[in-house]
Image (tube, grey):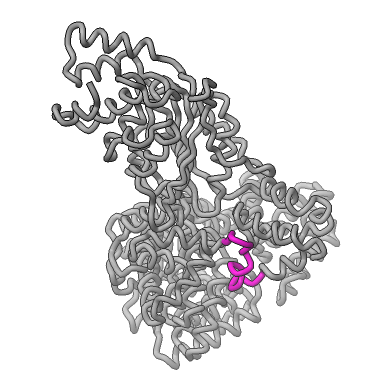
C-alpha cells in the first residue's frame, strides 16, 4: 500500500496527509531514507486509523513502525549528527545579564501540552538578534537534537512565507522530493510529527507578526526563541522580553571592547559624548566604534565632533553594510501612512516625554489611540512610565527622533504649522481648564475658545479631576510647548500659554519655570510687535522680581507693562501692573505713591465691575492705610475686601485678607481677634496646599506672638516661615524672621543665640536695596547686646 494510492482513494485532511507523509518516509513500504526518527506510538495508531486499517492489518502496521523506531543510520551506516544552524555568537557580546537569564528561564519552562515560546522585542538597532544568538548558544546544550535558525525577514518589506520556511526545515530533517507535502497545514503537521520525540531549539529572527510564526511552532519538548520589532501579543502562551538601549556601563564596556580600553581611558569625556550621541543604541555604538577601530590614528575627539551635529549624525553612523538609517527605514517602510506621518510629526516635540493624546491634534482628530498603539507595537515610540495623573507617557529615542526629523521635509510646511497650532491650542485649552480648577488666583487667565479638533473628553476629565497633579506631570512638557511656539514664531499662542500657567507657578513658588517661560515667549512677541503679549509677559516678569525683592527691575517692568497695556487698551494688564507698582511703593515706605496707584487700580476694577480685583485692591489699600496708622480706615477696607471675597466664593483671596487684616487688630490691642484671623487664614492655605501663603501667615503669627512675648508659638511660627523663605530666596521675609527670633532671644537673655540670629538678619538686610531703616534697627539691637 503506497501513499499515492491512499491519496487517490481516501478523502483525507491536509493534516492527516502531512502526518502520512511523515510516516511514509520512515516506515511504510520501502523507507526511502534512513536519517529520521520514527513517530510516537500514538501518532502511528492515529495514522493507521486515518489509512482505514483495522484488525491484524492495523496491528502489523504498528508493529512495523515500532521496529523501525529510533535514530536510523545514513547511507554510509553512520549516525546522523544533530542539526546546528545557529549563526556564530558575537565574541564581544556585552551585558544584558538580566535579559539573558529571563530568556533562558522562559525557554526552559515546562509548558503543559505546549511549547515554550520566548519573544524578544525591541526597536531597530537595539541588539535583538545579537542577544538571541547569545542566548541560543548558551542554552544549546538543553536541546541535544539540534538548533534551527530562520531569518523571517519581517522588516524587509517582503516577509517570508511560512510554507516556504517549513519546506527548508523539513529538508534539513531529510524530507526531500515527493515526500514533501503541498500546502502550509500539511507541512506544519509533518514538521510537528518529525519533532515529536526530539528536543530542538528553533530561533525565528525578525518576525513580522504572529501569523508568520504560528505555523512554525513545533511540538512539546522543543522551544522557540523569536525576535521582532513588533509586540506579538496574539501569540498564545508567548513570554515577551522587551529590550531597551544599553545602560551606561554596558555601553562603555561595548565601546571600549571594540575601540580599545587605552584609547577610551585617554579621552573619557569624548568617549562619553560619542556614547551619548549614539543614545546607547548597540548598532550605533558598534558602527562608531568600528570606524574608530579601523582608524587607529584618529583621536576620539574627531568622532565626537562628527557626531555632534544632529543633522548629519545618521550619515556618520554608517559602516559597510551597517547603517542606523537603513535599520530605521526597515521599520517605517512597513507602517501605515498615518502612523508614519504621526511618527514624523512627533519629532517636532523634541526629546521630551509626552502623553499619548498629543497624536490627536497632530493628526487633526480628537484621538489617535490606534496610531499610538501602532507606533508603540513597532517599537518606534517608547513607553517611559506612568505620570502623576496615571497617564502613560512616551518618548522618541534620540536617534529615531533625528530620523523622524529628516522625514518632516516630506510634510508640507503649512501642514506642519497647522499641526503645531492645533497642538498648542489644545495645550492652552487644558492649561486654562486646569488653572480654573485650582484655587482662585489674581493671575488666572480667561477661558479661551475650545481647541479644534476638540480634545477627547477622557483627557479633559483626567485634567479636571486632579489639576495639580496634571501640572506636576506636564510642567516640563508645557515649557517644551512654549519653546515649540517660539521656534515657530507663534507669538500669540506662546504668550497666552505662558501666562495661562502662572497660577500654578505662583501657587507652588516655581519661580524658575515662571521666569524661563516668560523669557522664551518674549522673543517672538517682541519680533511680531505684539503689544498685549509683551505687556502681559513684562508684568509677569515684574511679579517674579517683586517676589525676589529686586525692586528696581520689578518697577521698570511694571511701568513698561502699564504703558503697553494702556496703549493697547488692556484694562486687566493695566490693573495688575498698577497693583505691582503699589506693592513695591508700600514695601519701600512710599505710602502716598502706593495709595495713588491703588486708587487708580480700584477705578479700573470698578469700570470693569470686577469684584475679585476690587477685593484685591481693597486689601492692598488697607495695608497702606495701616502703615500710616490710619487704623479705622484700614479696618474698613479690610472688612470690605473680606465681604467681597465671601460673596464671590474666593477662598484663597479671603485667606489673604484675613492674614493682612490681623495686623490692624493686633495694632489696636485686639490680640485674640488677630490670632483668630490668622488661624482661619492658615487653615484655608493649608487646605489649598499653598506653601508660600502658609509661610507668610506664619510670619504674621510670629510677629503677633513675639510682640506679646509668647515665646513657644512665636518660635514655632517663625522657624516654619524661615525654612520656606530661605529655600525660595525671599530675603526680606527671611531677614525679618531672623530679626524677630534674635530680638526674642535678646529679650529672654540668650545673648549668644540673639547675636547669631541678628547678624544673619543684618547680612540679609544689607543685600536688599532700600533697607536702611531695617539695617539701622538691627545694628542698634546688636550694639545693645
In the rendered image, residue 525, in percent from the top left (x then y), is placed at 49, 85
* Residue lying at the far bottom of the rendered structure: 567
The structure residue drawn at horizontal position 48% and vertical position 41%, both measured from the top left corner, is 120
Image quadrant holding the N terminus, namely top left
Q: Nearer the viewer, residue 252 or 509?
A: 252
Above or below residue 72? Residue 485 is below
Q: Which residues are magenta?
A: 308-323
* Vertical side of 418 occupied by 153: above or below: above
Residue at 36 percent of width and 44 percent of height? 164
| Residue in front for this viewpoint, 600 or 150 | 150
Image quarter of residue 296: bottom right
| Above or below: residue 535 compared with residue 195 | below
Given residues 748 and 737, the one toward you in this image is 737
Which one is in front, 490 or 440?
490
Q: Is residue 656 left or right of residue 436?
A: right
Residue 361 visible? The answer is yes
- x then y, percent, for residue 784: 84, 59
- Taking 157 as reference, is 38 above or below it? above
Which quadrant, please, contains the C terminus? Answer: bottom right
Examine the structure image and report whether residue 309 is included in the region drawn in magenta: yes
Residue found 43% across the figure and 56% down from its top: 156
* x then y, percent, for residue 766: 77, 70
Q: In the image, is residue 291 part of the stretch drawn in magenta?
A: no
Q: In the image, is 640 to the left or to the right of 510?
A: left
Residue 674 visible at all: no
Amino acid at each position: 500500500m503506497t501513499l499515492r494510492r491512499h491519496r487517490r482513494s481516501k478523502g483525507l485532511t491536509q493534516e492527516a496527509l502531512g502526518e502520512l507523509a511523515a510516516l511514509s518516509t520512515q516506515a511504510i513500504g520501502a523507507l526511502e531514507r534512513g536519517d529520521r526518527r520514527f513517530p510516537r506510538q500514538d501518532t502511528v495508531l492515529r495514522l493507521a486509523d486515518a489509512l482505514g486499517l483495522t484488525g491484524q492489518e492495523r496491528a502489523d502496521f504498528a508493529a512495523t513502525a515500532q521496529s523501525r523506531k529510533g535514530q536510523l543510520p545514513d547511507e554510509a551506516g553512520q549516525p546522523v549528527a544533530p542539526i546546528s544552524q545557529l549563526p556564530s555568537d558575537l565574541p564581544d557580546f556585552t551585558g544584558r545579564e538580566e535579559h539573558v537569564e529571563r530568556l533562558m528561564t522562559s525557554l526552559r519552562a515546562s509548558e503543559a501540552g505546549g511549547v515554550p515560546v520566548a519573544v524578544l522585542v525591541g526597536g531597530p538597532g537595539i541588539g535583538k538578534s545579537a542577544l538571541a544568538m547569545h542566548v541560543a548558544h548558551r542554552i544549546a546544550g538543553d536541546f541535544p537534537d539540534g538548533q534551527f535558525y530562520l531569518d523571517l525577514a519581517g522588516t524587509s518589506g517582503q516577509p517570508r512565507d511560512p510554507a516556504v520556511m517549513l519546506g527548508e526545515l523539513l529538508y534539513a530533517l531529510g524530507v526531500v522530493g515527493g515526500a514533501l507535502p503541498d500546502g502550509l497545514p500539511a507541512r506544519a503537521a509533518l514538521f510537528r510529527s518529525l519533532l515529536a520525540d526530539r528536543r530542538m531549539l528553533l530561533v525565528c529572527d525578525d518576525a513580522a507578526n504572529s501569523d508568520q510564526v504560528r505555523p512554525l511552532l513545533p511540538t512539546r519538548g522543543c522551544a522557540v526563541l523569536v525576535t521582532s520589532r513588533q509586540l506579538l501579543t496574539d501569540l498564545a502562551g508567548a513570554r515577551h522580553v522587551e529590550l531597551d538601549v544599553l545602560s551606561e556601563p554596558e555601553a562603555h564596556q561595548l565601546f571600549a571592547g571594540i575601540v580599545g580600553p587605552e584609547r577610551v581611558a585617554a579621552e573619557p569625556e569624548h568617549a562619553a559624548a560619542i556614547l551619548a550621541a549614539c543614545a546607547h543604541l548597540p548598532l550605533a555604538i558598534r558602527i562608531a566604534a568600528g570606524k574608530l577601530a579601523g582608524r587607529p590614528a584618529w583621536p576620539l575627539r574627531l568622532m565626537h565632533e562628527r557626531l555632534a551635529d544632529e543633522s548629519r549624525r545618521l550619515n556618520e553612523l554608517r559602516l559597510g553594510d551597517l547603517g542606523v538609517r537603513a535599520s530605521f527605514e526597515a521599520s517605517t517602510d512597513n507602517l501605515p501612512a498615518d502612523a508614519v506621518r504621526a511618527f514624523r510629526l512627533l519629532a517636532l516635540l523634541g526629546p521630551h516625554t509626552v502623553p499619548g493624546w498629543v497624536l490627536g491634534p497632530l493628526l487633526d482628530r480628537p484621538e489617535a489611540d490606534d496610531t499610538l498603539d501602532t507606533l508603540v507595537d513597532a517599537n518606534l515610540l517608547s513607553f517611559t512610565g506612568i505620570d502623576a495623573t496615571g497617564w502613560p507617557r512616551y518618548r522618541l529615542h534620540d536617534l529615531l527622533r533625528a530620523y523622524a526629523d529628516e522625514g518632516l521635509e516630506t510634510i508640507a510646511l503649512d501642514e506642519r504649522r497647522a499641526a503645531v497650532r492645533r497642538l498648542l491650542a489644545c495645550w492652552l485649552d487644558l492649561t486654562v481648564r486646569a488653572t480654573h480648577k485650582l484655587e482662585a488666583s489674581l493671575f488666572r487667565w480667561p477661558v479661551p475658545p475650545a481647541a479644534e479638533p476638540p480634545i477627547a473628553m477622557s483627557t479633559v476629565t483626567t485634567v479636571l479631576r486632579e489639576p495639580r497633579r496634571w501640572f506636576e506631570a506636564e510642567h516640563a512638557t508645557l515649557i517644551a510647548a512654549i519653546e515649540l511656539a517660539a521656534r515657530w514664531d507663534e507669538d500669540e499662542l506662546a504668550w497666552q500659554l505662558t501666562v495661562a500657567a502662572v497660577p500654578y507657578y505662583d501657587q507652588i513658588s516655581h519661580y524658575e519655570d515662571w521666569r524661563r517661560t516668560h523669557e522664551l515667549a518674549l522673543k517672538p512677541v517682541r519680533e511680531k510687535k505684539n503689544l498685549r503679549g509683551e505687556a502681559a509677559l513684562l508684568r509677569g516678569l515684574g511679579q517674579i522680581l517683586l517676589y525676589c525683592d529686586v525692586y528696581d527691575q520689578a518697577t521698570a517692568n511694571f511701568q513698561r507693562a502699564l504703558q503697553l497695556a494702556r496703549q493697547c487698551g488692556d484694562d486687566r494688564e493695566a490693573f495688575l501692573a498698577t497693583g505691582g507698582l503699589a506693592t513695591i511703593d508700600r514695601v519701600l515706605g512710599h505710602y502716598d505713591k502706593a495709595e495713588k496707584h491703588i486708587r487708580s487700580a480700584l477705578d479700573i476694577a470698578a469700570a470693569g465691575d470686577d469684584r475679585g480685583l476690587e477685593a484685591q485692591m481693597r486689601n492692598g489699600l488697607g495695608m497702606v492705610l495701616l502703615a500710616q496708622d490710619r487704623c479705622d480706615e484700614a479696618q474698613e477696607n479690610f472688612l470690605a475686601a473680606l465681604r467681597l471675597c465671601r460673596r464671590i466664593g474666593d477662598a484663597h483671596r479671603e485667606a489673604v485678607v484675613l492674614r493682612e487684616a490681623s495686623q490692624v487688630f493686633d495694632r489696636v490691642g485686639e490680640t485674640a481677634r488677630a490670632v483668630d484671623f490668622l488661624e482661619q487664614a492658615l487653615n484655608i492655605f493649608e487646605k489649598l496646599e499653598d506653601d508660600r501663603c502658609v509661610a507668610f501667615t506664619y510670619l504674621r503669627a510670629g510677629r503677633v506672638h513675639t510682640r506679646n512675648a509668647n515665646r513657644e508659638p512665636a518660635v514655632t511660627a517663625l522657624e516654619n516661615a524661615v525654612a520656606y523663605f530661605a529655600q525660595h530666596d525671599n530675603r526680606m521675609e527671611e531677614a525679618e524672621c531672623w530679626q524677630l527670633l534674635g530680638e526674642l532671644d535678646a529679650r529672654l537673655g540668650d545673648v549668644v543665640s540673639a547675636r547669631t540670629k541678628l547678624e544673619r538678619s543684618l547680612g540679609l538686610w544689607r543685600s536688599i536695596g532700600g533697607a536702611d531703616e531695617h539695617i539701622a534697627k538691627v545694628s542698634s539691637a546688636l550694639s545693645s547686646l
